[in-house]
Image: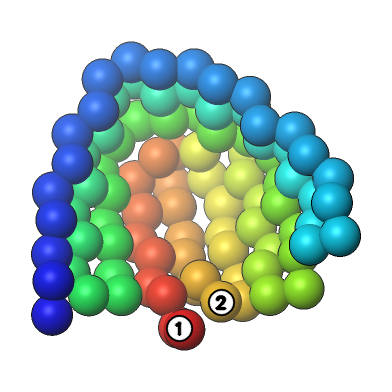
Amino acid sequence: MSGSFEAKGPSASMDVGLSDSGARAMVKAELASTSVSAGPATATIGLSADTGAKISPTQVEAKVLGTGVSFGREMGVSFLGTGFKFKLW
């Protein structure tokens, strides 16, 4: 099992795309966050206002002001930027 740790400061970005593999539109704004990964699991503590959606044959994700869910290849839940996700394959 491998693990990693990451810390981030203030950032903002936008990601929009459409392809054969899916569609995505996400606006991201983050004050700060810290994440730790161990194997397929990642936990994040932070404050963000990510808003948007992503959809593909293997994944569906929706967030409003950093709160949302992800279903499919990666399962996850977040609340105002703090959350947990787990890669199934």
Q: Secondary structure at mark 2?
A: loop
Cβ atoms at labels 2 and 1 below 8 Å apart: yes
Percent from the top left, x then y, of residue 77?
A: 47, 61
Q: Which residue is mark 1?
A: 88
The reply, left or right, for residue 29 in relation to residue 64 is left
Percent from the top left, x then y, of residue 28?
A: 55, 27
Percent from the top left, x then y, of residue 81?
A: 40, 40
Depth check: 50 or 73 in front? Answer: 73
The image's mark for residue 10 is none
- For badge 2, the amino acid type reads Arg
Depth check: 89 or 63 in front? Answer: 89
Depth check: 54 or 47 in front? Answer: 54
Q: Which residue is mark 2?
A: 73
Q: Secondary structure at mark 1?
A: loop
Sequence order check: which comes first, mark 2 or mark 1? 2
Residue at x-position 45% and y-position 83%: 88
Percent from the top left, x then y, of residue 49?
A: 51, 28
Residue at x-position 35% and y-position 30%: 47
Picture quadrant of residue 15: top right
Q: Residues within 10 Å of mark 2 (few under 14, many from 20)?
A: some
- For badge 1, the amino acid type reads Leu
Residue at x-position 66% and y-position 68%: 59
Picture quadrant of residue 24: top right
